[in-house]
Image: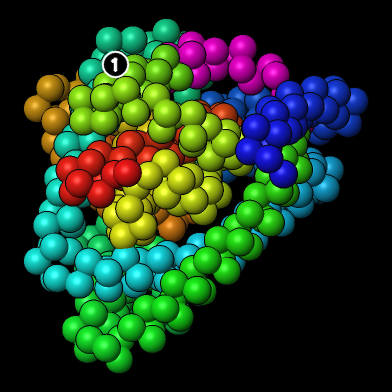
Amino acid sequence: MQKSKLTLYIFIALVAGVVMGYVYNVNVINKFNSKITAAEVSIKANDVQLTASTDTTTAAYKALKTDRVAQVKIRKTNDELREDKVEYFSILSDIFLRLVKMIIAPLVFTTLVVGVAKVGDIKAVGRIGGRTLLWFLIATLVSLALGMILVNLFEPGKAMHLMLPDNHLSTGIKATALSLKEFIGHVFPKSIFEAMSNNEILQIVVFALFFGVATAAIGEKGEVVIKAMDAISHVILKITGYVMQLAPLAVFGSITAVIAKQGLGILSTYAIFIGEFYFSLIILWAIIVFAGYFVLKQRVFALLSSIKDAVLIAFSTSTSEAAYPKVLLEMERFGCSNKIVSFVLPLGYSFNLTGSMMYMTFASLFLAQSYNMHLSFDRQLTMLLVLMLTSKGVAGVPRAALVVIAGTMAMFNIPEAGLALLIGIDPILDMGRSATNVLGNAIATGVVSKWEGELE
């Protein structure tokens, strides 16, 4: 499938998914959504009355408790029925994502070993790593700060006037703030096979660095290993080409499932928040591209053109991981050295998730605004620094951004129940931030290649 045709097919799948999702929502899913909404209204009404009751021994109080249990069961049953109805569409994207995850670990390992072994000198590896992490640190700070500035400027929480979720509502998100011990666990592998089976990118990177440096250090004997790894990486890149041909089907299934479940109505309900977040992402894109232009000059626009397929895949499937093999392929075609691409990209997937970073400050402060909580500038600055530390090394965690936000909310006494405001629209927001993560990592790879004089 030619590159230009792939872009066209992905775009057609995107539009077809929206149309199909809307039709399916109206004709099939809407009845379940209506029952879920009615149940949630009843649950909230019951909670208000239960909270107001002073005597818990009355028959009325017991009746309210019984009704609440019944409504929770109705909500759960209809939610499960709704999931069953969209399952056939979700399967399309699940197959694609599983195939992508199948090739990520061996792709990262083989390309990074070859790259590091070709660099050879451990000082050169340290220099490239230092420059890469410096860029990532600046990008993270800019993303978090931009989210903080814009959410204070727009104040979407105050404008929405939403009914706050009750304290009994389970969000299903485990609140966590990554401790130093857990961070170390995410970085250093106890088994390379475990790291590969769990797609722990950072752990694979650490082992590949040791393996690559050691391979270069043994000289002539290591050349056999380098040639073998180089051959394997090319085989996996060929597999990547086959897998990417399924991207339009995955895009269609993923978008259809999101729109079918949520309906277009959710866009109007949360229009202010979604609109302001996407406007903020556009500003972040402009900053990232300008930073890239500062180093790459006019070539930054050629880079944007070369990664458009990868950005579309990340946007449509709501995961930047799905685009990783495609980005790696396109950055090498763009002219970046194999050793730089295979070094910078895997690190970027743990340390340079610019879209997710901005979302974390934006969403955390949005929830504080929804509860009419005023956080002083120094408290917001503390939140920014906390997010900067706790967000590292959780790239492999499902719903990583929400998990980190949940942990941060607990630290700043923002009621965790507020996450219920985000869960419904998170897939729509995740599309934008996943696409931004891909852009940020592609620009970072191009910039480091230029700095190292490794850009053709």
Does 343 sit above or below residue 44?
below
- The amino acid type, in three-letter code, at marker 1 is Leu
Q: Position of residue 186 (x, y in %)?
A: 31, 66
Q: Is residue 223 left or right of residue 436?
A: left
Please tell me in which quadrant of the rendered image residue 443 appears.
top left
Residue nearest the viewer, comparing 87 with 194? 194
Prevalent SS, magenta region: helix
Does 254 sit above or below residue 204?
above
Q: Position of residue 135 (x, y in %)?
A: 19, 41
Residue nearest the viewer, comparing 219 with 445? 219
Please tell me in which quadrant of the rendered image residue 385 appears.
top left
The residue most toward the right is 27
Whether residue 238 is visible, yes or no, is yes
The secondary element bearing badge 1 is classed as: helix
Q: Residue at x 43, y 58 (%)?
A: 396
The residue most toward the bottom is 221
Q: The N terminus lies in which quarter of the figure?
A: top right
Q: Position of residue 171 (x, y in %)?
A: 51, 43
Task: Identify the residue under disc 1.
Answer: 150
Residue nearest the viewer, comparing 306 with 414? 306
Q: Residue at x 34, y 47 (%)?
A: 336
How dense is the environment of label 1, judged by Cα within 10 Å: few (below 14), some, or many (20 and up)?
some
Q: The C terminus lies in which quarter of the figure?
A: top left
Magenta-drawn stretch contains 311: no
Q: Position of residue 62 (x, y in %)?
A: 65, 42
Residue nearest the viewer, comparing 400 with 46? 400
Q: Which residues are magenta?
A: 260-277
